[in-house]
Image (cartoon, helix red, strand yellow):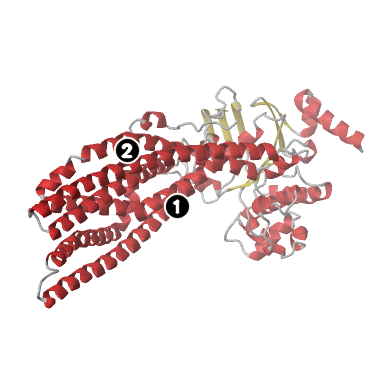
Amino acid sequence: MARRPQPQNGEQEREKSRRVGALRGLAPFLRPYRGLVVLALLALTLTATVSLMLPMAVRRVIDNFGTKSEALLDRYFLVALGFAALLAVGTALRYMLVTRLGERVVADIRKAVFDRVIGLSPAFFENIMTGEVLSRITTDTTVIQSVIGSSVSIALRNILLFLGGLVLMLYTSAKLTLLVLLIVPLVIVPILVLGRRLRKLSRENQDWIAESSGNASEALLSVQTVQAFTNEARARATFGRVTDLSLLAAMRRINTRALLTMIVIFLIFTGVVVVLWIGARDVRAGGMSVGVLVQFVIYSVMVAGAVGALSEIWSELQRAAGATERLVELLQSHDDITDPAQPAALPDAVRGEITFDGVSFHYPSRPGISALDGIDLTIRPGETVALVGPSGAGKTTIIQMLLRFYDPQAGRVLLDGVALPDMARDGFRRHIALVPQDPVIFADSARENIRFGRLQATDAEVEAAARAAAAHDFIAALPEGYESPLGERGVMLSGGQKQRIAIARAILRDAPVLLLDEATSALDAESERLVQQAVDELAQTRTTIIVAHRLATVKKADRIIVMEDGRIVAQGKHDDLVAQGGLYARLARLQFTHGAAAE
């Protein structure tokens, strides 16, 4: 069943006080384009001023329509034509400037949000779906683009028309203006009452859109699993339900906005009709000229139109305020994994000594379960260490701690005697090569997927790494060889081929520390033999940590660390551990006995 999006990071407390003032969060992105903003405001002021002057020209034309001087009448018409030309030029300039401003600001916001999110630790993504983050980067920024590139300038223009028109209405006829002002409270009340509901509905609508995007992203990224278990109908039903809920929220927002627009326009134009009726009686009585009445009516329509437009734009501004707040939340999201202000540096020649000093850790999403419990471990430079044990023993967590994806709740992790939190993350990670259990393949060519390990590598170095990982032959057999696109998440490759690409990437990185998390688990016997030879040769000159369930792949390790329930329960050479009995001997007996039986 689709879940209702829950407010995060104190949103429930902020919901009561959310205002269009949240748009202030856009100020840092507008600041670099101050010149563009000033030019846009000047163009906007020009168009508003010309619009306010046009009724005066109309009044002159009407009141002098019966004049005997054709030259005077021609002059009035030429002035009116000149105003129209100025209005056209000013409007075009305003559109061009604010649209450019919107495009630039939104591009900067998208880059800033992505730059922030791509560096956040995995703990952040335990509490938010990737699809929701993408929704914020795309859907929310589109809302902001619409507002900056259109709504804000229209709102400012209508404010100028409202204020200027009101002043000129007073100048034209104070009596009729006071009658119009009596209607203002009737217009403001529905704007305030329904505006609060619009804020809530706008936020709800955006939350459901994000939920829908997250649901779709999760299903599509796991499409083979969904299809293998014939759960397409369930995936369709879940996505359809969430999308329908998003649609219902949008319908409620649209209906509320339509009701607000209807009430405001009806009240405003009812007032205009009443005022026009009174003004017409004054004209008949000789109290004002027809030109003055027409001028007043035009200003009244301008003011009424400005108020009506503002009532519509107000809801757009509220929607953009919600979107801005969601994006600012990402930009200001707290992350426990940060770099120090003055990071320590590793020596130029990294030896690869790794130390776990009393490390205890639990994942943020599972605070009651210890993933590591008092780990004390020192790995000498150039040593090959294998981590074995049942699933959930903490083997992969050791690798995640070494990459500082998380920080321990107790103890320290050190590289060459320097604690990881004392260094910049990219400062020590560049000395580590990783082959993960689930290899990541990008929607790029085979060559660029391998080159991801070291972006400056030459084509020859890329191909040498592929040969060492036993990947060259299948890559060369692809339609375009090394330039063949591998599809999203490597959909064109088998599981074993993906792992060989990932191993080639690690070989190319040529780092002093090599981490292999079930690196050969998806390989066939021949490929595993070839890759194992490459790994053995690679491990001779660097510190290597191997996570493995298949004990046959780690028998040659310098040391085998046996883990259970987040603790080290034994360590030593293969033969010594078998002789000691215990967990390792039991695992070896199961695997090797079954393997011999299978043969």
Q: Which residue is mark 1?
A: 111
Q: Please state the horizontal and vertical placement of residue 220, each as a whole percent of the image.
A: 64, 45
Rendered image quadrant of residue 296: bottom left
- Residue nearest the observer in this picture, 477 or 396: 477
User: At 17% from the left edge and 42% from the top edge, which residue is drawn?
Assistant: 181
- Residue nearest the observer in this picture, 421 or 240: 240
Furthest residue in direction bottom, as rendered: 71
User: At 65% from the left edge and 56% from the top edge, which residue is drawn?
Assistant: 450
Q: Please state the horizontal and vertical placement of residue 102, each as a whole percent of the image.
A: 37, 56
Quarter occupied by the C terminus: top right
Q: Is residue 123 above or below residue 306?
A: above
Q: Tell whether 507 sits left or right of 496.
A: left
Task: Confirm or deny contact between disc 1 and disc 2 (CB under 8 A).
Answer: no
Q: Please state the horizontal and vertical placement of residue 566, each as a whole percent of the image.
A: 64, 26
Q: Is residue 68 above or below residue 576?
A: below
User: At 66% from the left edge and 60% from the top edge, which residue is drawn?
Assistant: 447
- Residue nearest the observer in this picture, 197 or 106: 197
**Residue 404: in sight, yes or no?**
no
Indicate which disc, 1 or 2, sits on the residue closer to the N terminus. Answer: 2
User: At 21% from the left edge and 71% from the top edge, which residue is drawn?
Assistant: 82
Q: Secondary structure at mark 1?
A: helix
Q: Which residue is mark 2?
A: 19
Quarter occupied by the N terminus: top right
Amino acid at dot 1: Lys
Separation of residues labelled 1 and 2 (CA atoms):
26 Å
